[in-house]
């Protein structure tokens, strides 16, 4: 079936914007993606018809709201290949999922224990471990890049495991380099040392099918807003036996069995980790973004994004002074670049004046910037609704501004 990008775009009213008299070209999808009507319709239906607190009532309206939320849990569980719905915990996003695991699972770590991270991590997969280190005295060990400055050095990764290693935590896809890491292999290596793994899937799920059971991931986290879904919602998948062995992360309503001043017991999974009223509106809408992705199909999305990526990369390389960061063969549709020695911010400002929406800065990956020897990049990131015409406009804009910058 032919990929009908115009039909897809018609579902995304948010793409229909103008800036400085130019039609918007939205190339900041790694930061957050636009949202289709189908997802927003669900949000509206929840607010107008089913705004009742979940899991708290015998009333019909509360049960309807609860069903909408729990339907998403079943949908997510099946979609990511979890063994049971109890293994799907709703969070505020990737960041909260990692904080939850570091704070709760990490309570068993002792001074001198080691957690392996990589140099290409987003701050949200660094700082929670640093906070844990300041409380417990654990040490962080960091996997470096190969000479290509794009892929992880697996020899270094292997060499970091020792009897003190208690956890490995790394991204599936880099938000700066686009590199798709060999996570199945990395998980198998960790498991051969008896070490559990957390995978940060924030940049994977918008672009590729993820099967947590096939990967044998112990924890897998992602955010709905990057996969055409609502803001403020995320998923933490955890293997049941690990989640059961972990203490609660936050206390409050819903996460308890019984409460008394003498002592409190915890609810069963998944509710033990869902204190307080969840964003049941957003959670309900998350299933619609999964439905949307599936209605297009990962294979078709991947083919389209790959064609755009290859085309954009080839055209960019023809521009004098262009410096690309992230050249792994197995790469997602993210292009980080600089033009000559121009500041990334200047490039971003000039692109903005031509309607091109990109991101500039360190992309919450300062350690990676240090390794690359730069302060930041301009980042253009693609999604299923981007078109070749948009890439042409982006390239034309780059050609126009490059002579002013080099
Ligand atoms: N991890 C990666 C690889 C990311 O790209 C991002 C966001 O850009 C995050 C984590 C944090 O996601 P969130 O802000 O939705 O929690």
Image: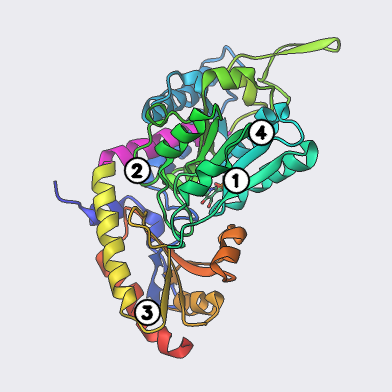
Residue 403 place in picture, x, y as percent: 41, 89
Q: Position of residue 257 (x, y in %)?
A: 69, 11
> Crowding at label 1, few (<14), some or many (≥20) Cα neighbours within 10 Å?
many
In the rendering, which numbered label is found on residue 164? Answer: 4
Of helix, strand and loop, which one carries label 3? helix
Residue 7 in the figure: left or right of residue 259: left
User: Residue 208: which quarter of the image?
Assistant: top left
Which segment is the magenta one?
Answer: 279-297
Given the current orientation, which residue lies at the most extreme right position?
261
Residue under label 1, please give it.
125
Colour mapping: rainbow
Q: Nearer the viewer, mark 1 or mark 4?
A: 4
Q: Count the numbered circles shown.
A: 4
Q: Which residue is mark 3?
A: 397
Q: Which residue is mark 2?
A: 208
Q: Position of residue 159 (x, y in %)?
A: 54, 43
The residue lying at 70 percent from left, 42 percent from top is: 139
Mark toward the viewer: 1 or 2 = 1
Marked residue nearer the N-terminal end (1 or 3): 1
Can you say whether 235 is above or below 358 in the image?
above
Above-or-below relation of 21 to 52: below
Q: Residue at x 32, y 60 (%)?
A: 386
Residue drawn 70% across and 35% down? 113
Depth order, front residue of 130/386: 130
| Front residue (pair 9, 75) | 75
Question: Mark 1: is the Cβ under 8 angstroms from ligand 1?
Answer: yes
Measured in 3D between alpha carbons, the distance from the residue under mark 1 to the one under mark 4, in whole angstroms, is 20 Å
């Amino acid at each position: 079936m032919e990929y009908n990008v115009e039909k897809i775009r018609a579902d995304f009213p948010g793409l229909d914007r103008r800036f400085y008299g130019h039609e918007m070209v939205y190339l900041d999808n790694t930061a957050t993606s636009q949202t289709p009507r189908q997802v927003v319709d669900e949000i509206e239906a929840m607010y107008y018809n089913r705004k009742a607190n979940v899991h708290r009532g015998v009333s019909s309206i509360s049960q309807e709201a609860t069903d909408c939320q729990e339907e998403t849990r079943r949908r997510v569980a099946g979609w990511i290949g979890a063994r049971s719905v109890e293994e799907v915990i709703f969070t505020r996003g990737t960041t909260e999922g990692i904080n939850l695991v570091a704070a709760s699972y990490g309570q068993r770590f002792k001074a001198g224990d080691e957690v392996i991270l990589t140099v290409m991590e987003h701050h949200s997969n660094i700082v929670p471990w640093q906070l844990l280190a300041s409380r417990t005295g654990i040490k962080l060990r960091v996997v470096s890049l190969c000479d290509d400055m794009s892929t992880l050095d697996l020899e270094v990764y292997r060499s970091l495991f020792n009897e003190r290693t208690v956890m490995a935590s790394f991204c599936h896809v880099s938000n700066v380099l686009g590199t798709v890491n060999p996570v199945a292999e990395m998980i198998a290596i960790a498991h051969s040392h008896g070490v559990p793994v957390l995978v940060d899937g924030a940049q994977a799920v918008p672009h590729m099918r993820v099967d947590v059971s096939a990967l044998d991931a112990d924890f897998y986290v992602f955010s709905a807003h990057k996969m055409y879904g609502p803001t403020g919602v995320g998923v933490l998948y955890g293997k049941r036996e690990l989640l059961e062995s972990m203490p609660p992360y936050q206390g409050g309503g819903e996460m308890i069995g019984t409460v008394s001043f003498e002592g409190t017991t915890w609810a069963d999974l998944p509710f033990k980790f869902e204190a307080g009223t969840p964003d049941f509106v957003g959670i309900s809408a998350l299933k619609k973004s999964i439905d949307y992705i599936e209605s297009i199909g990962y294979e078709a999305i991947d083919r389209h994004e790959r064609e755009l990526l290859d085309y954009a990369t080839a055209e960019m390389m023809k521009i004098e002074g262009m410096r690309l960061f992230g050249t792994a063969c197995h790469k997602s549709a993210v292009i980080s670049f600089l033009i000559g020695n121009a500041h990334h911010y200047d490039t971003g400002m000039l692109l903005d004046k031509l309607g091109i929406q990109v991101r500039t800065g360190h992309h919450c990956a300062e350690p990676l910037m240090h390794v690359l020897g730069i302060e930041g990049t301009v980042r253009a990131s693609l999604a299923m609704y981007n078109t070749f015409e948009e890439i042409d406009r982006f390239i034309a804009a780059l050609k126009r501004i490059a002579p002013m910058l080099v």
